[in-house]
Amino acid sequence: MPTIAAAELRLPARRGAFDRERWLTGVGLLLAVALLMLTVALPVGALVGQSLFDRSGAFVGLANFARYLESPALLQSAFNSLWLAALSAVLCTAIAYVYAHALTLSCMPGKGVLRAVALVPLFAPSLLPAISLVYLFGNQGLFKDWLGDTSIYGPLGIVLGSVFWTLPHALLILTTAMATSDGRLYEAAQTLGASRWRIWRTVTLPASRYGLIVAAMVVFVLVITDFGVPKVVGGQTGVLATDIYKQVVGQQNFQMGAVVGFVLLVPAVLSFLVERRVRRRQAAALSARATPYAPAPAPVRDRALLAFCAVAALAIMVMIGMAVFASFASYWPYTLTPSLRNYDFGNMDGGGWGSYLNSLRMALCVAAIGAVAAFLSAYLVEKPRHFGPLRELLNLLANLPLAVPGLVLGVGYIFFFNAPGNPLQGLYGGMAILVICTVAHFFSVAHLSSLAALRQLDREYELVSESMGVPFWRTLWRIHLPVALPTVLQVAGYFFVNAMTTVSAVVFLYSPQTTLAAVAVLNMDDAGDVAPAAAMASLIMLTAAIGRGLFALGGRWALARTQQWRNR
Amino acid sequence: MSSFLSLRGIGKSFGTTRVLDGIDLDIEPGEFVCLLGPSGCGKTTLLRIVCGIEQADAGQLLLDGQDIGRLPPAARGFGVVFQSYALFPNLTAAQNIAYGLQPSGALAREIARRSREMLDLVGLAAHADKYPVQLSGGQQQRVALARALAPNPRLLLLDEPLSALDAQVRAGLRGEIRALQQRLGIVTVMVTHDQEEALSMADRVVLMHDGRIEQAGTPGELYRRPRTRFAASFVGRMNLLDATVLAGDRVRVRDSELRCTPSALGTGARATVGIRPEHVVIRRFGEDAGVNSFAARLLGTEFLGNRTAARLACDPLGIEIEAELPAGDPRGEPLVPSSMVHIELPQHALSVLA
């Protein structure tokens, strides 16, 4: 019989240690709250505040807003933004709905390839489809005749380009919504003799209703806050996003920029609130006992869906291929012999290869810092037992970036970090501010993914550790991090891709030493170097895709190496 | 004061809901105490207060005479097994068991020895390097138990430790946990809603109801001498009759007089008398035994393997009575539904409840 005499292993009373742990958790929470205040809440607050002052810094109340309302051009932009975003949202959601339906609820062949093709636009900056549109339908475009007298520069171009680059976002939301549909309901409907149309109307549509609303909201916000597409193919059609840029960068009219930013903030915040509400309802509607639905073949439907998806996928490939193809042409459209002269960025505007390397450096920093920060913030929100109100505040702040358009955040950073007397002013103009801003900009989705991963872990792990006197950081390091590592790497990949492709926030913050690749695309296009712009955009897309792939490989390595326990 | 752990007037509210209301309990060295009760009775909250996860609003928690009510869980040195086991999925059985040993600064060799020792103790030496998903539910349970015991806790707390297991494994583990507890002599407090579990494992069962202790005693006491209606109906089954006390050992039910075990209730008091189904005696009709004997009609029987349950309508008492007979009792009468019989409620088995 074993002896249980190991008195030396008995735990001493460790009250001091406990107090230190609780104190440390509190400090961590305060620090996280302070960081998010500094990087999100205060800059946005600074923007809102600035809209109430004039150029000389005197308080003018709503005078700036009055001037805004008196300017027909600016009002027209706001109106354009609204209807273009709404139209894009409707079109994109409709296409994505059929596409998602085909991917999840049919027996269409080639699902894997079609899904992969539809997700490619995620890796490209929104500038790339716009540049492709110029090559396809612009003044020297291949298919210019198709449009007759209509110009691609304007509403048509904005809607086409927007639908293209937002399609994968809507598709991801809708496939998730449809993949969770309850197989038992389909079986019940079939045994009751319902027709396919009736099943769609009574089962599929209600189950995906929330997904549709969320997808439409997300696309609406993405389009209304996007800057890349209208900048390149907007022509004379002004929108809110380009107005901010013109006011701040072009006319150095920061106050009016703040007003336009505030106007842009309104729809973003509103749809953020609607989306949260809808998501919560959707979560409540999901039954834990749902069984996955395995669709049965239906040749006519499957063929029709295949035809639709094939056309959509072809359009996506043409949009991507056009820019890539043009970037390799010697002199579009006259000399089509392949050459690399457009990749000779050293001789162009926009910072050359330096911009590319800057982007790469920034994206790696953002991936590393962002993934760790999101994991820690999610841990601090989810796991400690104390500090309830503080944890709720942290969660609220971590969700805030979702409601803040990148352009607004960028302009807010100018006001906040460049304000005289701000001790953090030294950051302004450096690489650090670009990294901080990008992490903050994309923080919410990362935070929410990490939170979802941590929520899957038993809450009693903390209690077990606490009852055994093991400090929380040891459990964090030995249990939570290894178990959540695949998610952490996935989040890092998400940050990397977005940091490579983003333009909106950083366009206000880069300096001559810290030019970025996506901004270079913009500047080269502005200067008329469309082919090099296409080349840089293609390079960004390639880099983002490779980066994402490497992080995914890392995730698989982590699974294989540290998670043998998942296999029985 | 020789009690190992004393709870003095423990009270706890969540918002306006009073979850625990003046709990007094003394736990002696070496004792296995079960907190038994329906869900919502406060038993889990009480365990969490003892553990230190929750803090009581009122009262004292004394360990060896020292107030530990304000101490954090870690400082109490108690071992806890949670309902879900909460085994760390990415650590092996041995690593799980060693998890709580590191902070005390013991040598790695010492920790490995202790971990092995605990694995031996729960009979899982062959499974040291398996991950939790590779173990069966019962094995996971035993790892959780070993992990809680490894740091040599002063007190073992078990929160519904068997509820996630299927019936057969549960029955086996009941005996194992009890044997282990007795071998180690460790004071154990277990929470359960399963009366069978409580009766078969504990030295003392503490029956809780609506945040109060309804009755505490040995399993035998609780079963044989329930003091309240709730205790009678929660632990085992009991026929309950509304009665008026006539004298110390006589009560009236409707128009009939019954003799029962003596109670302290005053004449004229309203009371409930109860009798366990297995104590009801069924006789051939006409075999009137005199005291506490009544005519009844057999409504139906139910075969339960080792015994037979019978439902009887007893008009003089105005209730339906349940009786249980050992199966294949040679003296037993063939039970024909709708036939008339005589039942006797033996005086010694008829207890008066508050």
Image: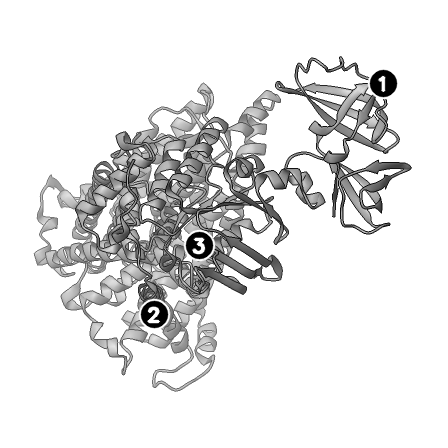
Q: Secondary structure at mark 1?
A: loop
> Dot 3, how many residues are within 10 Å of its Cα: few (below 14), some (14-19), or many (20+)?
many
Disc 1 sits on a residue from what chain? B
- Image coordinates of residue B339 in percent, x first then y, are 84, 16
- Image coordinates of residue A416 in percent, x first then y, are 31, 75
The quarter of the picture where residue B295 lies is: top right
Distance CA(mark 1)–CA(mark 2): 85 Å
Q: Which residue does the numbered mark 3 point to in the structure image?
A: B51
> Quick check: do tags 3 and 1 share a chain?
yes
Indicate whether A124 appears above or below A435: above
How did the renderer colour the structure? Answer: one colour
Q: Looking at the picture, tell me which residue is in the foreground, B156 or A133.
A: B156
- Image coordinates of residue B135 in percent, x first then y, are 34, 31
> Dot 1, how many residues are within 10 Å of its Cα: few (below 14), some (14-19), or many (20+)?
some
Assess whether mark 2 and mark 3 are in contact (beta carbons under 8 angstroms). Answer: no
State the mark number for residue B256. none
Q: Looking at the picture, tell me which residue is in the foreground, B193 or A410.
A: B193
Q: Secondary structure at mark 2?
A: helix
Q: Which residue does the numbered mark 1 point to in the structure image?
A: B285
Indicate whether A390 appears above or below A182: below
Look at 71% across and 35% down and name the residue there.
B238
Q: Looking at the picture, tell me which residue is in the foreground, B328 or A56.
A: B328
Distance CA(mark 3)–CA(mark 2): 34 Å
Q: Amino acid at mark 1?
A: Phe
State the mark number for residue A34. 2
Q: Amino acid at mark 2?
A: Ala
Indicate whether A369 appears above or below A42: above
Disc 3 sits on a residue from what chain? B
Q: Looking at the picture, tell me which residue is in the foreground, B162 or A153.
A: B162
